[in-house]
Amino acid sequence: MSVSEVEEGGLFRAAPSDNSQDLLDNPTKTVATGSTPEDQASPVVDEASPSSASSFEMLDMESAHAPYQEVQPHWFFCRRADDNTSWLPFSREDSDKLENAFTNISDEGEEDKVVAVEGQRYDVHVKERKRYAVYWEQAPSEVRRCTWFYKGDKDTRFMPYPEDFSKDLEEAYRKSVTSDEWKKKLDFPTGETVILHNPKLIMQYQPIGLQDDWVSSPSEHTRPRTVKRGVDNISVEIPDGEPEKVDHVVFMVHGIGPACDLRFRSIIQCVNDFRSVSLSLLASHYKRAQQEGQVGRVEFLPVNWHSALHGDATGVDEDIQRITLPSISRLRHFTNDTLLDLFFYNSPTYCQTIVDTVASEFNRLHVLFKQRHPEFSGTVSVVGHSLGSLILFDLLTNQRDESQARQGISGEPCHLNCNTLEQTLNRLGLQQYLDVLQNENLDLESLALCRDSDLKDLGIPLGPRKKILNYVRRKWLPEDCRMGAVCQAQGPQLQPEVTSTQDGNESSGLPPQQFHLHRPQSVTSAVDYEYFDVGIGQVSIDYPQLEFHPQTFFAFGSPIGMFLTVRGLKRIDPNYTFPTCKSFYNIYHPYDPVAYRIEPMIVSEVDLEPMLIPHHKGRKRMHLELKDSLTRMSMDLKNNVLGSLRTAWQSFARLPVAALPPGEGGETTTEKTLEETQASAAVTASTKREDKGANFWTKILAWSSAIHRHYFRGGFDEAESSESVEEREHREIKMGMLNGGRRIDYVLQEKPIESFNEYLFAIQSHLCYWESEDTALLLLKEIYDNLGVAIEQPQQ
């Protein structure tokens, strides 16, 4: 059937069904009767009727004859999300590496080659055409060497043809170019038809058998697909390649639930977005340093603990499902899968699983990254979002520093005191229990590691047990061994079973350099909480050790302050710091319902505002600048009015009150003086009103220039000469050693639309950090400040 006959019958349609693409994936060739051997090597190519392209005459069908040039391929990978399938291009650098590997395999006949792409986070098996994730579990995705693309009316982007299909199209195109004969038709066994009208106009038509029965419009039947040759002829954004040099590594831990944002994306996808934001900020705010080779990039890697907690190994989902009511199933599923993570973390059994998973993932990712980047000599930071920040806080609090680690490795005991066990019992008046303890080979060091239940098993009554444990724990452990003895005994550590007495962590009994976190006297019975000298009330578990020392700990939308308060802590000692991490930032959105502050627990006597995170363009947001300007103007006007009233009242209060002889006009001197004073006050008030009016409009017009100053200045320069006295006072206040004496609480600037109703954006505010340029820039600034690379002021 000729092309013209097919068009007249209305058999062509552009918008393909889903089944048509499945048939395109495995096209075979049709051989025409009586065709030559050369024709048998490709699909049937018939000369199309001239009338088939009559509607395309305006597109220069008589194109000038040009020599054939081989198409340049570009490599794509497939991304499947729910029912949607999209093909995304590799960067040009990665595509060139894949093409070189493909050429070597074709020329030399080698076995499959593995090419690292996308910052070495993925490996592509070239011969297998599969892309595998390196650092996390993810299903392999298909990879395709693409040369020809199509797009229907309802498609938003061009899709690549299968490689076999593209090869046939390229062969037909080569024949048409070399012979300068167009209007050719290619038929495939699937019923697909491609017509080469001219080099610039190539269309694909779908067979009638694959069309939807309900489509009745003739125009919908005849819409073809647009076919393009080469990636340069389609509208696709090819990503920039990532620098090979890695300056820093950041591990990011998620919060409750499997989804991390309102689009229900996983931690992997959210971290990918955060990495993309950081790369764009490096290009804009560290452009000169990148050109000079001082800055490479920062690698962000996700840490997923939710799948391990809810996996088959724990079986907790099955246990919860058995007791879950059948009503409102979706809401109950959300509660079981997300909200219950908070309760799981406060359970000794599942808290151990969570902490072990996070620590093992940290160590595994660190080792794997060093293997793939042997030249890396930088440091590592950690980020925790929501509950993930609390997990990191507890984990970092229970790390051992180098001196404690050496003690643990060498096995050298801490000599608690020169006093013997006998002298201690005599001082307590409990010498009758000396034989019982000596029969168990207990000395002061081993006694300090005993539980209350251990002494109970020896037959020692409750009163003597409490005296022994309290005395050994609080008096005989010297200052340099308090933390070491507790940390080395990760299993059988001291545990008060009931803390309804005053035997808890009283600050008067512990040295200030070790008792970092203060707890009030407990009035309730304790759950099975571990006794730590830092007294932060973690669940009784063994905290594993990390194989690296984090440089900085960033908390996003963190409830750490709330959990510490619920655990019974009133304040954090200013001298407290993490054993292996010297910097800590608490970053939050002002409308985040889960976030809490940390600084008031350290400096409770001063009411400090949090540090405002600058906009990534180096200024305050316009609505905040206007709000501050209007606030300052209203305060100035208020002060001026009050000052005028005060002056008038003082003038009135100073009037003479003594009775004087009346004047000739019948007026007293007092009345004259009063009239003169009132007139003078009226003139003064009128003059001040004029001055205030001029001052008011001057300040109204001054806010725009203030925004201009903040737009290009200072957002990142703490030595800003124009900063207020209040900001200088805030900076001079010591925030303790948790962040090296620097500020800890940093608040983002809300967007203008968020300021209209903070309740509408509360949930979104808790999930906004993954795509926040301001948050990413604060991380980059902290990282590169430690490397001695200054941030560049943003350009206009």
Image: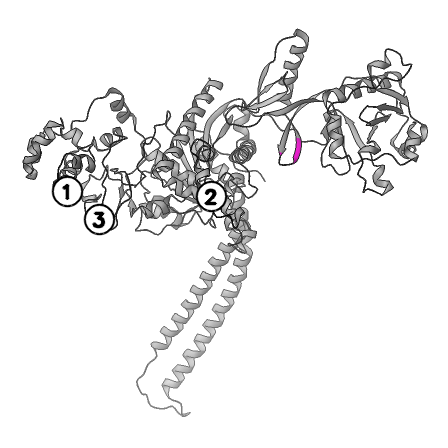
Looking at marks 3 and 1 on the same chain, the residue that comes earlier in the sequence is marked by 1
Circle 1 sits in a helix, a strand or a loop, which is it? Answer: helix
Judge depth for marks 3 and 1 and give the one in front: 1
Residue 582 shows up from this direction: no
Q: Residues within 10 Å of mark 3 (few under 14, many from 20)?
A: some
Please provide the residue range marked out in magenta: 81-86
Which disc number belongs to residue 336? 2
Looking at the image, residue 570 sits to the left or right of residue 153; the answer is: left
The Cα atoms of the two marked residues, 3 and 2, are separated by 34 Å
Q: Which mark is residue 462?
A: 1
- Give the quadrant of residue 771: top right
Kind of residue at disc 3: Ser
Residue under circle 3?
500
Helix, strand or loop at mark 3:
loop
Place of residue 96 in the rendered image (x, y in percent of width and height, measured from the top left): 64, 19
The dot on residue 280 is none
In the rendered image, which quarter is residue 210 located in?
A: top right
